[in-house]
Image (cartoon, rainbow, N blue to C red):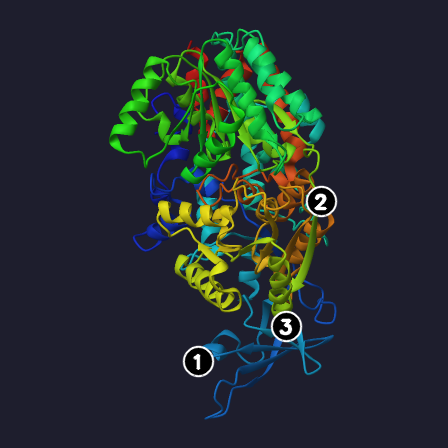
Amino acid sequence: MTDTSLRPSLLDPLFAPARTLPGVGPKVAPLIEKLLGTPEREARIVDLLFHLPQGGVSRRLVGSVAEAPVGEPVTIGVTVVAHRPPTQGAGRRPHRVVTEDATGEVTLVFFGMPRARVEKMLPLGAHRYVSGKIDVWEGMRQMVHPSRIMDEAGLADLPAVEPVYGATEGLTSRAINKLAVAALDKLAPLPEWQDPAWLAKNRYPTFADALRTEHRPDDVPPRPADPLQPTPGTPSRRRLAYDELLASQLALALTRARQRRKAGRVNAGDGRLVAKLTEGLPFGLTGAQARAVQEIRADLAAPRRMLRLLQGDVGSGKTAVALLAMASAVEAGRQAVLMAPTEILARQHFERLAPLAGALRLRLMTGRDRAAERRATLADLAAGEIDILVGTHAVFQEAVTFHDLGLAVVDEQHRFGVHQRLALGAKGEAVDFLVMTATPIPRTLALTFFGDMDVSILDEKPAGRQPIRTLTLSTERLDEVVAGLGRAMAQGERVYWICPLVEESEFVDLAAAAERFEDLKQHFGEGVGLIHGKMPGPEKDAAMARFAAGETTLLVSTTVVEVGVDVPEATIMVVEHAERFGLAQLHQLRGRVGRGAKASSCLLLYRGPLGQVSRARLEMMRETEDGFRIAEADLKLRGEGEVLGTRQSGLAAFRLARIEGDGDLLETARDDARLIVERDPKLETPRGQALRVLLYLFEREAAIRLIGAG
């Protein structure tokens, strides 16, 4: 819940409900809620102000019909010359109106509009101004359904640029602009929280002026030709982006400063246990793994809390690093916990760790344990009889008590925010945190979401791993693919066949996967298995186990195999409708093969024709296996909410900033936030007081509560 009791009163008008604006009646109110409200709270005036236009349409008058460009929105002045209504029984023929100026003709075209209405809008001989796109049909210029038809008075009231907003059914872009302009009247003068010299250098307007310019633009920025290039931000848009990024980075810096203030404990012993486990590993550590272990041990040995992100590309060996980190805590007489987002992954982590763990006492705890088993685990955990507990995030429920928890390792943590990290630490005294992700995160996003953490990167693959050959093929060649799989499976290869997730309907997914399963079964008989998200957990585990044991050699699956599933014998990955997947997802899926010593391949099947973005994605997959390069490209193609999977969960990081275009500002905001916290840790100076307003405005007030906390 947001604590509003300490919010500065000058912000109250902005946090009033949007339905209190003039012009919002019982019809419009539910539409605003649909567009900007959430299940937890109704739409507020600030939500309207932060719902910036996605672009603009120039309404400036073009000199003449002859000069008006084809295919772009224009406004021209014309005289009505003739009406050509459809004849009786002509079906869906349009009503055409011939107009002209001194340089040429343009026909206005109306489908399904009553004749009387068209004649009233455009009387014969009248001079009118029309806005819309001109196209050429049978060699003649025409404008289908002009967006505006005005006389002199209407033209005088027309803005030079009409902003275009993301809208919802029943609420037009024009109506949203009207409401946003009304919301601007609620903006009280706010204190300036940015450094004046920095503002002057960048020629940035004040916060309020920047919002006014965005909702009442006087120019349309040019669009870049390349889809991998973001639209350049105007000074007003950049100013607003920086305000939001600074609020985010300042909240992270205050969180981090508070974590640093909390006394840690030394959670590393003399290194003997770690050395013994390292010697016992069936492989040598890569340089990147050895470096990460060193960084983690240095943190564990320091008397302050560790909060470290371990980023490793698919198959870079995070599990071994996590084991050695947990062994360090056990050396110091403490316990460790490893948490995974799903039961399949928790079980798999346990199975991977068990043979490597030597004398360490490992235990697995999942929601499927029988009551007696669970009671025994809880008792042993509280008595200190378990060194390392592996489980899902359920291990942080009330009933779970550790004897002395020293280190928590969290897998695939990008689904959890800063506040959840703070809450998890309450399970033990001065718990150190190691967070692991197999999703390579571009530097800008790592700063955004993990700016309160130190980062270790595993950027080398273990010795013996072969490169994965990636091919793109049209679905028209499906028969060739199936024949090729038959030959490979006859030689003992194992295959994943991924069917896409169609977001509109899970049942469509299941139907597609089930249909492909039946189809492949006709070719390969009982050697084909099926796994999908709607299966009960034990069935999923059993299907996975059959594939891992080689009882089935081809596994048809929806994307449940995406994260962490490890079958080293699988050497072929087929992704059907690859054009529907994001880059990061394709990279994760490809990483399920190439985990053993054998050469592996990945077939990306697409249905043409491909759009510009889909083609760019598939080409990037063919070009490189470097997860970080792929993640940067994904960010440019899709934006930050999609890359981290936060858009689906409603947690898109920013409303005003666009990470794909404002990454340079993020670096500046981080440095600025660190300086502020060093010089004014309690935000007491005049700028500090203004920055408190900024944090409340962007609803990062939880960070203000940390300032006074111990």
Q: Position of residue 397 (x, y in %)?
A: 32, 26
Crowding at dot 1, Cα within 10 Å, few <14 / some 14-19 / many 20+, comes out as: few
Badge 3 amino acid = Val
Relative to the observer, which residue lies in front, 67 or 607? 607
Please tell me in which quadrant of the rendered image residue 596 appears: top right
Q: Position of residue 354 (x, y in %)?
A: 48, 28
Relative to the observer, which residue lies in front, 504 or 308? 308
Relative to the observer, which residue lies in front, 138 or 258? 258
Q: Which mark is residue 180?
A: none
Q: Position of residue 593 (x, y in %)?
A: 61, 46
**Which residue position is annotated with label 2?**
467
**Which residue position is annotated with label 3?**
78
Count all numbered tags in the image, as a single digit: 3
**Which residue position is annotated with label 1?**
114
Comes first in the chain, label 2 or label 1: 1
* Mark in front: 2 vs 1: 2
Label 3–label 2 contact, CB within 8 A: no
In this picture, residue 534 sits left or right of residue 128 = left
Crowding at dot 3, Cα within 10 Å, few <14 / some 14-19 / many 20+, comes out as: many
Comes first in the chain, label 3 or label 2: 3
